[in-house]
């Protein structure tokens, strides 16, 4: 009897994915990044740079991430179903076009947030993702939030306050966030796919961060899956609040830009540059305070300094390749 019920439910679940062109386990990280993260948690992930010593995460971080990893993968089927709900009931969101999207990118603490929020003031032309839309990229959840806000605005205010408390006062002071404010969307791939440089404020291991940041060096299948999650999540923003406006995105995923340029040849790309030495102290303070909350412990100071300098080497190389050299990115060269 149980096997029959299970078979029917499995067939129904599988059939819905096929019928609505919904990718299976879209939120699951690439296997290669999961493996690096497990190695980091186990203390066996070695540094690939002579300038950055081998690093073992503090016990507080290890215990926290063992729990989070088990919880994440233990609920992956439920997460998959939550994504599937959008495709079944709001499938038209996939018709929303990102062709005229504008992508702002730059290193951490270079002024990207100020530029992003300044351009976003032109609300007649642009719409940007909000924090909760990249943290929980479900249309049905957004609809519930909209209903709650109409019913009693204090409800959303209370949720906002809880989220700000969870992020921490120090982090909020350095990077203010609000429920309705425009927010960077690399949190999406960093949280769900363990990908992008934003991982450095979520996971306290310098070598794992490097593997996560080099998105263009991941297997092609992983790149396609990341793009699909990213694209669908931003299409949901346009479906829910776009009203004919163009998407305005801001992130630090410079190694993801070639993938976006290939898939969205009509999109515009804007870079903002600040000397790493000018940005370092600000970035060190933000990343360490964020890791103290979101990973339960920061990276050791001496290692963090070396890791940050290594990050800038990779970031600047990718930035130069994409915006100056234009290596193999075709028609988008005129759109930068």
Image: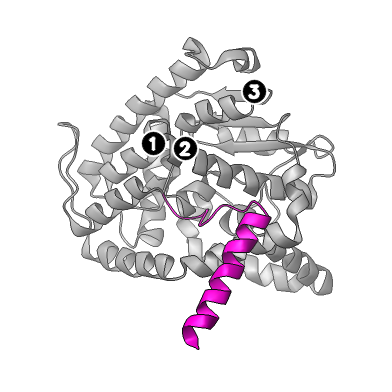
* Res 103 → quadrant: top right
Return the disc, 3 or 1, that comes first in the chain's sequence.
Answer: 1
Please state if 2 lies on the left or on the right of 301 as rendered: right
The local crowd at label 1, few if under 14, some if 14 to 19, many if 20 or more residues have their Cα within 10 Å, is: few
Q: Residue furthest bottom?
A: 1
How many residues crowd around disc 3 within 10 Å: few (fewer than 14), some, or many (20 or more)?
some
Say if 1 sits above or below 67 in the image: below
| Towards the viewer: 44 or 249 | 44
Give the spatial CA distance, label 2 vs label 1: 6 Å
Colour option used: one colour
Counting from the top left corner in percent of width and height, residue 38 is at 27, 56
Determine which residue is flagged by label 2. 223
Q: What residue is disc 3 on? A: 265
Q: Which residue is mark 1?
A: 219
Residue at 62% x, 53% y is: 22
Residue 196 location, x and y as percent?
Answer: 44, 41
Specify the segment rendered in magenta.
Answer: 1-29
> Image point 57% across, 63% down: which residue?
14
Pair 3/1: label in front? 1
Q: Nearer the viewer, residue 73 or 284?
A: 73
Q: Residue at x 78, y 50 (%)?
A: 92
Main SS class of the magenta portion in the image: helix
């Amino acid at each position: 009897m149980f096997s029959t019920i299970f078979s029917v439910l499995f067939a129904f679940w599988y059939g819905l994915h096929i019928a609505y062109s919904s990718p299976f386990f879209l939120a699951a990280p690439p296997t290669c990044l999961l493996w690096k993260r497990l190695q980091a948690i186990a203390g066996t992930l070695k540094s690939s740079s002579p300038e950055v010593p081998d690093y073992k995460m503090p016990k507080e971080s290890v215990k926290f991430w063992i729990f989070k990893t088990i919880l994440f993968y233990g609920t992956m089927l439920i997460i998959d179903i939550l994504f599937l709900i959008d495709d079944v009931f709001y499938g038209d969101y996939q018709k929303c076009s990102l062709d005229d999207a504008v992508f702002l990118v730059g290193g951490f603490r270079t002024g990207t947030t100020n530029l992003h929020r300044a351009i976003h003031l032109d609300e007649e032309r642009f719409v940007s993702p909000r924090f909760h839309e990249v943290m929980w990229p479900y249309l049905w959840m957004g609809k519930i939030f909209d209903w709650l806000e109409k019913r009693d605005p204090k409800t959303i205010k209370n949720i906002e306050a809880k989220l700000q408390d969870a992020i921490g006062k120090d982090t909020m002071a350095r990077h203010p966030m609000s429920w309705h404010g425009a927010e960077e969307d690399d949190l999406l791939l960093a949280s769900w796919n363990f990908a992008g440089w934003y991982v450095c404020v979520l996971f306290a291991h310098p070598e794992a961060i490097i593997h996560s940041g080099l998105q263009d060096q991941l297997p092609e299948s992983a790149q396609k899956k990341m793009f699909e999650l990213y694209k669908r999540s931003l299409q949901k923003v346009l479906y829910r609040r776009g009203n004919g406006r163009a998407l305005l995105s801001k992130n630090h995923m410079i190694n993801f830009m070639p993938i976006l340029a290939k898939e969205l040849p009509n999109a515009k790309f804007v870079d903002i540059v600040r000397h790493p030495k000018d940005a370092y102290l600000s970035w060190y303070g933000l990343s360490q305070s964020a890791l103290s909350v979101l990973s339960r412990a920061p990276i050791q100071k001496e290692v963090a300094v070396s890791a940050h300098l290594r990050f800038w080497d990779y970031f600047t190389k990718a930035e130069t390749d994409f915006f100056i050299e234009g290596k193999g990115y075709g028609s988008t060269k005129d759109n930068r």
